[in-house]
Image (tube, rainbow, N blue to C red):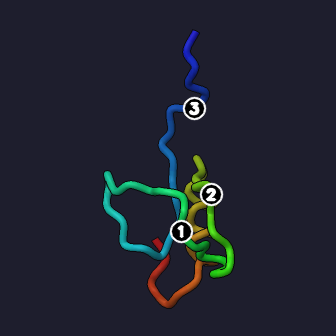
Amino acid sequence: MSDVLDEGPFFHGTKAELRVGDLLAAGFRSNYGPDVLMNHIYFTALPDGAGLAAELGAGDAAPR
């Protein structure tokens, strides 16, 4: 039996200009509140969920 529950694809909504293969790492300020230091990364299997997260992120860049 495989330990993999979902093989993806997975999505991460952001306003950062990321490329395939870029590393997402915890330990940075949250896009949603600059006083929050994130100790985890959010991702989803739902493209619409990632899109909503990107829309809610801080900054003027285009959501991705």
Q: For residue 6, which numbered disc appears in the image?
A: 3
Instruction: Judge left or right: residue 22 versus residue 5.
Output: left
Q: In this view, does 31 lie above or below 43?
A: below
- Local packing at callout 3 (Cα closer than 10 Å; few below 14, some 14-19, many 20+) is few
Q: In this view, does 44 lie above or below 18?
A: above
Q: For residue 4, which numbered disc appears in the image?
A: none
Mark 3 is on which residue type?
A: Asp
Residue drawn at x 68%, y 73% is 36
The residue closer to the viewer here, 9 or 32, is 32
* Dot 2 or dot 3, earlier in sequence: 3
Q: Is residue 28 above or below residue 49?
A: below
* Dot 2 or dot 1, earlier in sequence: 1
- Nearer to us of marks 3 and 1 is 1
Mark 2 is on which residue type?
A: Asn
Disc 2, SS: loop
The residue closer to the viewer here, 61 or 47, is 61
* Dot 3 or dot 1, earlier in sequence: 3
Mark 1 is on which residue type?
A: Phe
Quadrant hosting residue 34: bottom right
Q: Name the residue under label 2.
A: 39
Q: Where is residue 9 in the image (x, y as percent from the top left)?
A: 48, 43
Q: Position of residue 58 (x, y in %)?
A: 58, 83
Q: Mark 1 points at which residue?
A: 28
Residue drawn at x 58%, y 19% is 3
